[in-house]
């Protein structure tokens, strides 16, 4: 019995040992197979992964391209900047590391939380900007302790610099920290946290060109993130320099001529379409944004009623006032509805549809031909012309002169202005067009809107004989010469008749733009005064002197010079400036004087000085300043 039990026990133990041995053998075989898979089959892959764990990829920012003026002078440059960055993966706890760094680089708790928030939207092995524009003291304090802060590194970048401060700031634009909308606007650019990107002006328009291509350094690091050696390096591709058509002296003079007044000046070469000056006041200093603008400063810019961030030269849309009368004159001539020597009587007003339409000269101009009507800006004359040709012809000729549509300058901020039509009013108000609206349109009021750039392009087209060009701010091999938009659509003889009237505006005894006369050449121009608040008029149409300056009319002036060979075309608007002849024309004169004096070598041209009116002035009072309704 005992012997049988012993045999049974031995058999059971043998079976258990066999099962255990089989299981052990299977486990060893599986382990061996796994080791063979990891070390032989996948050995190369895991070797690469191990190598990557000790390699840090450090981006090398490309120097941003400079922006130059037409002479090659530097408008925008770069200066070195030191930035503190952290690789979150190597930091051993980003929040803890940042709070240890705080005493050395003056980091607030709000800034620390902001960095932590940004880290969540970026890969942890990439450098994360902590603070820009380190001072020498901050740089020194961190550098001597750099090994105590794992994953921390000092990076050298190029800081954007605007050496001329506010000069041409609206043209140049400014930089700001990249946002999600910027990333969507430039999908081909690999932006990193804290990168700066063009926010406005040429900085924005030519961001890919100016930015260049980022380089990279492959650095071997130890377990603490300390750099051991450089394994490989791809140098960055510097951004390309951008040369503008801006004349720095002319730009400076235009801004100085505007002074503290709100407004804009645009000067162009009528032969090429190159923009020589584009001033908008008030302006701003782009360096504010690079140096770190505070919330208070930013809010002050946004809430300033004078709109310093708005480029009024291309974004400001204003009723063009009497500067628009050239469109009506051209339309009447082209339609065969006007004989330039025909006399049309002005008694100071025109009655139509139970409404009185006033002339700025309330006692009337008497009998006027085309030249006199342009030079003295007779409203009644152009009311009657508008009746003859109608709104459709006015709209067509306005478009031929570049009004009511984008000029093609290229800046995204540009506004299109507005030339009303029957179809537009039907879409906008679901209403028909009334005859009285045609009369108001004829003097540049009502629905008509234009930018200073459009007005400069209009007068440039008239100056060069009818060639509408696409304005440009970018210099090219042809000196900035641009694409022709319209050519041959306007009768050159009719344009010459209008130019005679424009010359009389400045040099005629009763011209409204006499304050634009230059001693260095003859000037042709047109004044304009656009109504701001319709309610600020007396029953007879006269403008009331409102105590609030914001109720004053806008002052406009457009011109070109010299008359016989136009080299400069200019438009000026002074918001709430009162009258074009007394406020805007002197601004244009300063810019024209500078340009023509350079062309003539400072030699004054005979017959351009203001004549001594002698007894004429004593017998007859000078005309009133233009006061457009």
Image (tube, grey):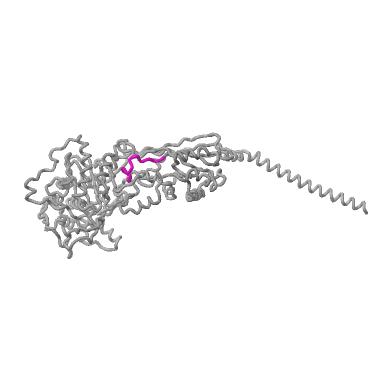
Q: Is 194 in the magenta? A: no
Q: Which residues are magenta?
A: 159-170
Residue 304 percent coordinates (x, y): 33, 53
Tell me, yes or no, if residue 339 can be seen here.
Answer: no
- For this orientation, the residue located farthest to the bottom is 354
Query: Relative to 157, is 117 above or below?
Result: below
Identify the residue at horizontal 39%, vertical 41% (top origin).
Answer: 160
Q: Nearer the viewer, residue 584 or 226?
A: 226
**How many labels, in total?**
0
Residue 412 percent coordinates (x, y): 35, 48
User: Taking 290 as reference, is 590 left or right?
Assistant: left
Q: Is 161 in the magenta? A: yes
Identify the residue at horizontal 21%, vertical 36% (top origin).
Answer: 599
Q: Nearer the viewer, residue 404 or 69?
A: 69
Residue 46 percent coordinates (x, y): 61, 40
Q: Nearer the viewer, residue 64 or 102?
A: 102
Q: Quadrant of the N terminus?
A: bottom right
Query: Relative to 593, is 446 above or below?
Result: below
Q: Quadrant of the C terminus?
A: bottom left
Q: Nearer the viewer, residue 413 or 362?
A: 362
Tell me, yes or no, if residue 559 can be seen here.
Answer: yes
Residue 151 percent coordinates (x, y): 54, 42
User: Taking 345 as reference, is 418 left or right?
Assistant: right
Where is residue 537, by image quadrant?
Answer: bottom left
């Amino acid at each position: 019995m005992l012997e049988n039990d012993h045999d049974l026990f031995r058999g059971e133990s043998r079976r258990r040992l066999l099962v255990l041995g089989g299981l052990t053998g299977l486990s060893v075989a599986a382990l061996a197979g796994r080791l063979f898979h990891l070390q032989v089959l996948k050995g190369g892959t895991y070797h690469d992964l191990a190598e990557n764990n000790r390699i840090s990829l450090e981006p090398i920012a490309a120097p941003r391209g400079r922006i130059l003026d037409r002479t090659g002078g530097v408008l925008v440059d770069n200066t070195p900047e030191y930035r503190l960055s952290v690789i979150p993966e190597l930091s051993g706890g980003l929040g803890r590391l940042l709070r240890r760094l705080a005493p050395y680089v003056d980091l607030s708790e709000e800034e620390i939380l902001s960095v932590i928030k940004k880290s969540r939207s970026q890969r942890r092995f990439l450098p994360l900007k902590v603070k820009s524009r380190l001072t020498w003291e901050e740089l020194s304090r961190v550098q001597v302790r750099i090994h105590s802060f794992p994953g921390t590194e000092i990076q050298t970048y190029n800081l954007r610099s605007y050496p001329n401060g506010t000069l041409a700031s609206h043209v140049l634009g400014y930089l700001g920290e990249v946002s999600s909308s910027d990333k969507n606007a430039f999908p081909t650019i690999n932006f990193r946290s804290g990168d700066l990107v063009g926010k406005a002006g040429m900085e924005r328009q030519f961001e890919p060109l100016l930015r260049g291509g980022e380089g990279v350094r492959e650095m071997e690091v130890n377990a603490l993130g300390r750099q051991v050696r450089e394994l490989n390096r791809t140098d960055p591709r510097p951004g390309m320099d951008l040369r503008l058509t801006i004349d720095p002296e002319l730009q400076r003079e235009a801004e100085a001529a505007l002074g503290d007044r709100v407004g804009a000046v645009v000067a162009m070469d009528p032969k090429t379409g190159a923009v020589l000056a584009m001033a908008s006041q008030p302006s701003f200093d782009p360096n504010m944004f690079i140096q770190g603008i505070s919330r208070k400063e930013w809010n002050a810019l946004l809430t300033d009623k004078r709109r310093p961030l708005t480029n009024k030269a291309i974004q400001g849309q204003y009723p063009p006032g009497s500067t628009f009368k050239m469109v009506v004159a051209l339309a009447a001539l082209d339609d065969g509805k006007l004989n330039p020597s025909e006399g049309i009587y002005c008694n100071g007003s025109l009655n139509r549809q139970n409404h009185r339409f006033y002339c700025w000269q309330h006692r009337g101009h008497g009998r006027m031909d085309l030249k006199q009507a342009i030079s003295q800006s007779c409203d009644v004359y152009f009311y009657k012309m508008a009746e003859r040709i109608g709104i459709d012809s006015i709209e067509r000729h306005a478009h031929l002169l570049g009004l009511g549509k984008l000029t093609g300058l290229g800046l995204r901020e540009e506004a299109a202005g507005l030339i009303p039509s029957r179809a537009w009013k039907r879409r906008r108000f679901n209403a028909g067009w009334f005859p009285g609206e045609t009369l108001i349109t004829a003097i540049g009021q009502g629905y008509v809107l234009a930018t200073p750039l459009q007005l400069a392009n209009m007068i440039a087209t008239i100056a060069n004989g009818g060639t509408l060009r696409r304005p440009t701010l970018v210099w090219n091999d042809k000196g900035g010469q641009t694409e022709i938009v319209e050519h041959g659509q306007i009768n050159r003889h009719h344009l010459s008749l209008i130019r005679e009237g424009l010359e009389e505006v400045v040099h005629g005894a009763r011209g409204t733009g006499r304050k634009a006369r230059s001693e260095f050449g003859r000037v042709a121009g047109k004044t304009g005064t656009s109504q701001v608040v319709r309610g600020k008029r007396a029953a007879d149409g006269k403008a009331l002197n409102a105590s609030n300056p914001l109720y004053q009319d806008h002052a406009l002036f457009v011109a070109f010079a010299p008359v016989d060979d136009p080299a400069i075309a200019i438009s000026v608007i002074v918001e709430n400036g009162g009258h074009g002849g007394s406020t805007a024309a002197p601004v244009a004169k300063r810019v024209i004087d500078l340009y023509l004096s350079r062309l003539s070598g400072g030699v004054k041209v005979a017959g351009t000085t203001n004549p001594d009116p002698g007894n004429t002035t004593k017998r007859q009072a000078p005309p009133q300043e233009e006061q457009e309704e």
